[in-house]
Amino acid sequence: MIPAAFDYVRAESVDDAIAKLGSADDAKLLAGGHSLLPAMKLRVARPATLVDIGRLRDLSYVRADGDRIAIGALTRHHDVATSDVLRDGCPIVASTAEQIGDPQVRHMGTIGGSCAHGDPAGDLPAVLLALEADFVVKGPGGERTIAATDFFTSLFETALAPDEILTEIRVPATHAGWSYLKFNRRALDWAVVGVAAVAMNGGAHVALTNMGLTPMRAAGVEEALAGGADPAAAAARADEGTAPPSDAFASDGYRRELAKVLVRRALEEALG
């Protein structure tokens, strides 16, 4: 439980962090640390340099921006959960953040760190995928925006370049029906399976947690809803195209059946 040796530097600004990432070999950003540090202790991750951006307070905010809501990447889960802007304008994000870990985790972990870590068992990535959020990133070449459908690329991998920083997440301001349901063995465990559903155009966008190498849209469910299927019939297609893991918590077959149950319940709540 002791990490490999590493260097530590503290960034004074976003541009300073980008420069430090570019000048160091095998560098990783450190924000809240609740995903990276446990991986380092297990030596699953062995970065040579940590670039600490946790004190960049200008990346911690939630504000309305027209028909979107902008969330700074370093906004703590607690601040996301208690934001009046999100509770009024996009409550599924606030509600999901409130379900993450325990108070200590929520006061340290950040929404940007959770997304950049690329863990398919994370709660917020699936919600942001269902909402078709946008991710604003900045690197040496300037700023660019990545759609949620393109952001998560593989297990613990995202579309972020090694010298880029996630600075902001933009979600739609919507009062449509929604639901985020997850099953876990204990209150603080990662989700065995989770489901995000957001009512859209008479149907719903549905995204799955821990059903593959990345958070993923339940394409079969959405297709069935568009064709007029009820929640129960649509949910029967919840595991189409998925590749759930088998581990100490559940087999892949168990996860497939659990996903169908949770999708049905989430659809009934979101569309009801």
Image (cartoon, helix red, strand yellow):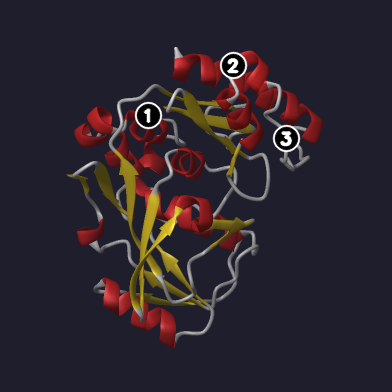
Quarter the C terminus occupies: top left
**Residue 271 in the image, given as x and y percentages of width and height:** 46, 17
Q: Nearer the viewer, mark 2 or mark 1?
A: 2
Horizontally, is 140 left or right of 206 in the view?
Answer: left
Displayed quadrant of residue 140: bottom left
Which residue, given by chain and number where applicable, does mark 1 sit on?
95
Which residue, given by chain and number where applicable, does mark 3 sit on?
240
Q: Which residue is the extreme one toward the bottom? A: 23
> Are the residues at dot 3 and dot 1 in contact (C-beta closer than 8 Å)?
no
Q: Give SS at disc 1.
A: helix
The kind of residue on which mark 1 rests is: Ser
The kind of residue on which mark 3 rests is: Glu
Which residue is drawn at the image coordinates 49% and 28% (left, top)?
204
Q: Which residue is the extreme one toward the front? A: 227
Which residue, given by chain and number where applicable, does mark 2 sit on?
231
Query: Disc number at residue 69?
Result: none
**Residue 90 in the image, given as x and y percentages of width and height:** 31, 33
**Residue 137 in the image, given as x and y percentages of width and height:** 37, 65
Q: How many tags in the picture? A: 3
Which residue is drawn at the image coordinates 25% and 32% (left, top)?
89
The residue lying toward the viewer, choosing from 24 and 73, is 73
Horizontally, is 154 left or right of 35 in the view?
Answer: right
Measure the alpha-carbon separation of dots 3 and 2. Answer: 15 Å
> How busy is the neighbourhood of tag 3: few (under 14 within 10 Å), some, or many (20 plus)?
few
Mark 2 or mark 1: which comes first in sequence?
1
Mark 3 or mark 2: which comes first in sequence?
2
97 relative to 263, above or below: below
**Residue 166 in the image, given as x and y percentages of width and height:** 38, 62
Which residue is drawn at the image coordinates 28% and 71% (left, top)?
14
Measure the alpha-carbon separation of dots 3 and 1. Answer: 27 Å
Q: Nearer the viewer, mark 3 or mark 1?
A: 3
